[in-house]
Image: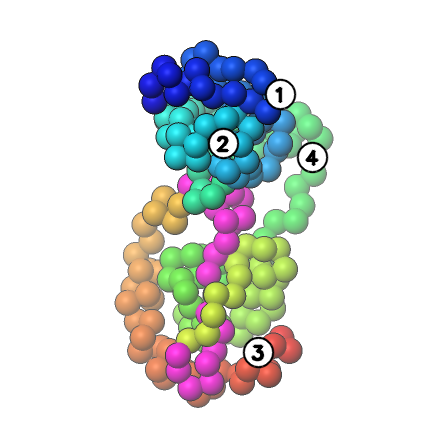
Amino acid sequence: MSNSEINNAQTENGSVFETVKDIEMAVEAILFAAGYPVTYEKLAEVIGLSKSDIKQIISNMAKNYGGRGISLLMYPDTCQLSTKEDFAPYIREALGIRRGGNLSNSSLEVLAIVAYNQPVTRSFVDTVRGVDSSYAVTSLLDKGLIEACGRLDAPGRPMLYVTTDKFLRVFGLNSLSELPETDGLNTAAANLDAVESADTESEPSDTEEADE
């Protein structure tokens, strides 16, 4: 970004930024105060730059959070400041936050299967786990960690599920590419087509799926 572009960056209240550092501090302050994901579009509007310039600045900022207790997470349309998971116990103790709302083992299993193999149907999840996963799937949907993304083009047209941006935020990830390698789940992914073709007849109809 050139100095002339920086000098042309003007906020809604008329203030003008003189350096990229000034813009970075403004962005950091906004994200810290928000406490939730803020769109690049809104940041660009407030700072007075283009959306692409804001994303470039934030991308450079994110690289400087490696040795700190917080991370600057970037998503396709938003970004957010987040504390690092390593310090969660200290944060809970300092703020008097009780442990609660943790996912059950079954929900964690389902979430992992969806995350590593998405998009997947519920019958695929059931087959990998060897048990019915209806309750866990519904719980994850209610928590906003997974969502429906359409239907599989197969008999019965079963619903397909994927993880959400909230899933990335909760686990401190910028993208699914940052998920750790898991050989067992990758093997399951390789068998997805075979499982789906064998189980689609047992999938509930559209009406039954909607009632779950």
Q: Amino acid at mark 2?
A: Ala
Q: Residue 131 appears at what percent x and percent y?
A: 50, 73
Q: Residue 67 appears at what percent x and percent y?
A: 41, 22
Q: Residue 180 appears at what percent x and percent y?
A: 35, 47
Give how far apart the Cα atoms at labels 4 and 2 are.
35 Å
Element carrying mark 2: helix
Instruction: Please say whether residue 162 is visible from this viewpoint.
Output: yes
Q: Earlier in the sequence, mark 1 or mark 2?
A: 1
Give how far apart the Cα atoms at labels 2 and 3 are.
42 Å
Say which of marks 4 and 2 sits in front: 2
Q: Residues within 10 Å of mark 2 (few under 14, many from 20)?
A: some
Give how far apart the Cα atoms at labels 1 and 4 are.
38 Å
Range covered by the magenta-colored residues: 153-174
Is residue 19 placed above or below 117 in the rendered structure? above
Is residue 193 placed above or below 155 in the rendered structure? above
Q: Which residue is mark 3?
A: 209
Say which of marks 2 and 3 sits in front: 2
Give how far apart the Cα atoms at labels 1 and 3 are.
51 Å
Query: Contact, CB < 8 Å: mark 2 with mark 3?
Result: no
Is residue 66 placed above or below 178 in the rendered structure? above
Is residue 191 placed above or below 27 in the rendered structure? below
Near-viewer residue (133 or 150): 150
Viewport quadrant of the C terminus: bottom right
Give how far apart the Cα atoms at labels 3 and 4 are.
37 Å
Q: Which residue is mark 4?
A: 97
Q: Earlier in the sequence, mark 1 or mark 4?
A: 1
Residue 44 disc label: 2
Q: Residue at x 43, y 15 (%)?
A: 7
Q: Which residue is mark 1?
A: 13
Position of 4 compared to 138: left or right? left
Q: Amino acid at mark 1?
A: Asn
